[in-house]
Amino acid sequence: MKILNSKILKEIDEATCKAQEIDSLVLMERAANAIACEIVSRFLPSRRIVVMAGPGNNGGDALGVARLLIEQGYRRVEIFLFNMKGKLSHDCNEERKRLISIEGVSFTEVNPGNFRPPHLDKDDLVVDGLFGSGLHSPLQGGFASLVKMINESGAYIVSIDVPSGLSGEWNSHAVRSSMVHANLTLTLQLPRLAFFFAENAPVVGEWKLLDIELDKDAIRQSQTDYILVDARSVRPLLKKRDNFTGKRDYGSVLMFTGSAGMMGAAILSARAALRTGAGLVTVHSASCGMPILQTAVPEAIFEPDRNKWLISDMTLYHKHQAIGVGCGIGTHEETINALEMLLKNPRGQMVLDADALNCIAKRPSLLSVIPANTVITPHAGEFDRLFGEHASDEERLLKAVEMARYYSIFIVLKGHHTTTVSPTGRISFNSTGNPGMATAGSGDVLTGIITSLLAQGYPPELAAPIGVYIHGLAGDMACAEMGEAGMTAGDIAARAGLAIRKVIESKNQQAH
């Protein structure tokens, strides 16, 4: 699913009107109807609803919603239209005319100096239609005071398209205290980039997409570097396994993982690689881990390091299609030296995670010898150790785009919407996963999954986002059985293969 900026979305609105031979007011009515239906499905007619509408098309949507709610039997609807400059958009003005034609409607058109704020409390519902996604400057003056009043009221807030004050894309200089803090954001057709940054979560709240039948060809032809990865985008990319094949047709994985006290990381990454379909998995680790690994994952080959307690040698003795490095290896000087030799003599696709990244952070010169097309999978802390401190997810993403291009690597920024950044600047946000995945070893599982896909011949630009999606879906399946608090990384690894099957079977179900 594409993530488009506000300018392109406006162009798609215009293209829709032309293709479907409708005027923009019809499109506004679709939006208002979709939003009103969602409100009706969630709130009883006895609820007091206060609609705050601005002078633009976002306000027009809000006025349309108010009218439709009244027509559905909601009798406690109060509407405030803020027309501070005496100028409404054409469609907003048309919705105003329709609304005030209703007998007995509680409607106030606010002009400078005549606003008496309504009392709001926690039992009320506020519909925020003040400003839409095209806003690019912070709210000030009276509007900032109005937003503060709404936020402090304790009322349940539903924002139309985006919360007022939030730009649909970048908000690095925004004042979030001057933004509406929505409980629910009902956005139209496609998600907004701003929804995927953690710092905006308290502003956006829950968000839901509403289909208003924008022209599919216009959406398809639009250009963007931002994608939300979902089942529909993953299904056609999964490879079919042929009948006349053997284990070597599905690649050989080598994992440099584990050390004394950290063999769980080796177990989890190896299990995940196997459950994702790798034909062969070899684990190279501290020799003390041999009985642990071969007991816990008998399907994997164990290659003991000459050091009993840590990894001191990353020499490649056999051919492997993909190499995963870092889970639980520590940051000992001998391990850093071994990693440096591996990076300078690459053979096969590579995934660097966890302590591999911490080793590089301790010896920054290694950044320059990471092989092109390597996948690195840092969480926020690891990313900042590599590339400097960042105050927000938005800053971190912009830096990731710069670094991915500079070093020709793929960066998987782990988080709620784990984000894959390619050297070309293409950015894929993930749609699966849940808070229960914030558990020890979850990243080790992801490393195993991505490394397995690389070994099976998926290029990194596909292996990384597909792996992230499968990892999140396996986590969702584990959560459904164990609950967020009860699930473990082992539960995620165990369901990686089931997650792949679920994606494939969803295609077959659609076909029927």
Image (cartoon, rainbow, N blue to C red):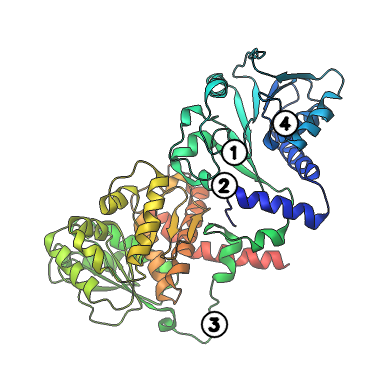
Picture layout, residue 506 above or below residue 54 = below
Which circle's residue, 3 or 4, is located before the other in the chain? 4
Q: Is residue 144 left or right of 97 when viewed as pictured?
A: left
Question: Nearer the observer, disc 3 or disc 2?
Answer: 2
Name which residue lies at 73% across and 67% down.
512
Distance from Cα at disc 3 to Cα at disc 2 = 40 Å
Front one among 373 and 57: 57
| Three-letter code, disc 2 | Arg
Residue position for label 1: 162
Quarter assignment of residue 160: top right
Q: Secondary structure at mark 4?
A: loop
Q: Which mark is residue 119?
A: none
The reply to whether discs 3 and 1 touch (Cβ–Cβ < 8 Å) is no
Question: Nearer the observer, disc 3 or disc 1?
Answer: 1
Residue 425 percent across, percent down from the top left: 45, 61
Which circle's residue, 3 or 1, is located before the other in the chain? 1
Residue 168 visible in this rendered orientation of the protein: yes
Front one among 426 and 486: 426
Which circle's residue, 1 or 4, is located before the other in the chain? 4
Which circle's residue, 2 or 4, is located before the other in the chain? 4
The reply to whether discs 2 and 1 touch (Cβ–Cβ < 8 Å) is yes
Residue position for label 4: 88
Distance from Cα at disc 2 to Cα at disc 4 = 25 Å
Distance from Cα at disc 3 to Cα at disc 1 = 47 Å
Distance from Cα at disc 1 to Cα at disc 4 = 20 Å
Crowd rating for badge 4 (residues with CA inside 10 Å; few <14, some 14–19, many 20+): many
